[in-house]
Image (tube, rainbow, N blue to C red):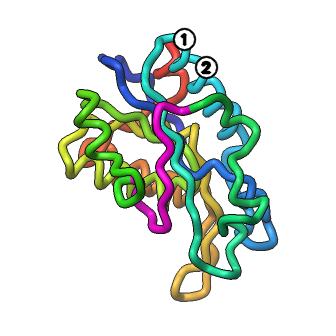
Amino acid sequence: MQIPPRDLALDRAALLVVDVQRGFDDTAHWGERDNPACEANIAALLARWRERGWPVVFVRHDSTSDASPLRPGQPGNDLKPEVTGTPDLLVTKSVNSSFHGSPDLDAWLRANDIAQLVVTGISTNHCCETTARVGGNLGYDVYFALDATHSFDRTAPDGTVVPAATLAAVTATNLDGEFATVVTTADLVR
């Protein structure tokens, strides 16, 4: 999906790095993915945020399912190597929204007078989209870095396979102008 460049007015936005965990590399469990540049784009955003001295939040999914590679205590629960350094906040969760984890993301953002969020991570149409929707509903100015997320192919209720890139395009369509502004990494690193 080609997104036209956006002229952004960012002011100390928090970068949310959602569920960028090793367990998502298990293609036998998750299936085929899109956007092989996702992790490199997240690394570029992390570097730029640290240059600016802006807040960085890592979010980790601690699955409660015995079959999940994202269970605590499993290697798949660990963050990927591109997610470097110490975040200003680490949120752990067992549901889709980063706002429903511990510690309380909304309370932390408000206590630190942060009104803008940039959402990145895995997967585009699940935890990233849900986080963007809840953030928008809570009144944050949300930017969704589409090329710093990735999805997996999914089987629809009728049995057809919906490609990951299609799911990402639908997520971008659902979010833009309603819950968030969909942007690219290039828009954010200027």
- Residue shown at 49% from the left, 67% from the top: 94
- In the figure, 44 relative to 122: above or below? above
Reading the image, the residue beneath label 1 is 51
Q: Residue at x 57, y 38 (%)?
A: 147
Query: Mark 2 Cα within 10 Å, few/some/many (few <14, many 20+)?
Result: some
Q: Nearer the viewer, residue 60 or 82?
A: 60
Residue drawn at point x = 52 percent, y = 36 percent? 2
Above or below, 18 against 46 in this view is below
The residue labelled by disc 2 is: 47
Q: Looking at the rendering, in which quadrant would you find the N terminus?
A: top right
Q: Residue at x 54, y 88 (%)?
A: 158
Q: Are marks 2 and 1 in contact (CB under 8 Å)?
A: yes
Query: What kind of residue is marked 2?
Result: Ala
Q: Which of the 4 image quarters holds residue 75?
A: bottom right
Residue 175 % position (x, y): 34, 49
Q: Which of the numbered marks, if any, corresponds to residue 29?
A: none
Residue in the foreground of this view, choosing between 103 and 39: 103
Query: Going by the image, does 79 lie left or right of 151?
Result: right
Crowd class of label 1 (few under 14; some 14 to 19; many from 20; radius 10 Å): few
State the extent of the magenta-drawn residues as a range: 87-98
Q: Is residue 48 above or below residue 32?
A: above
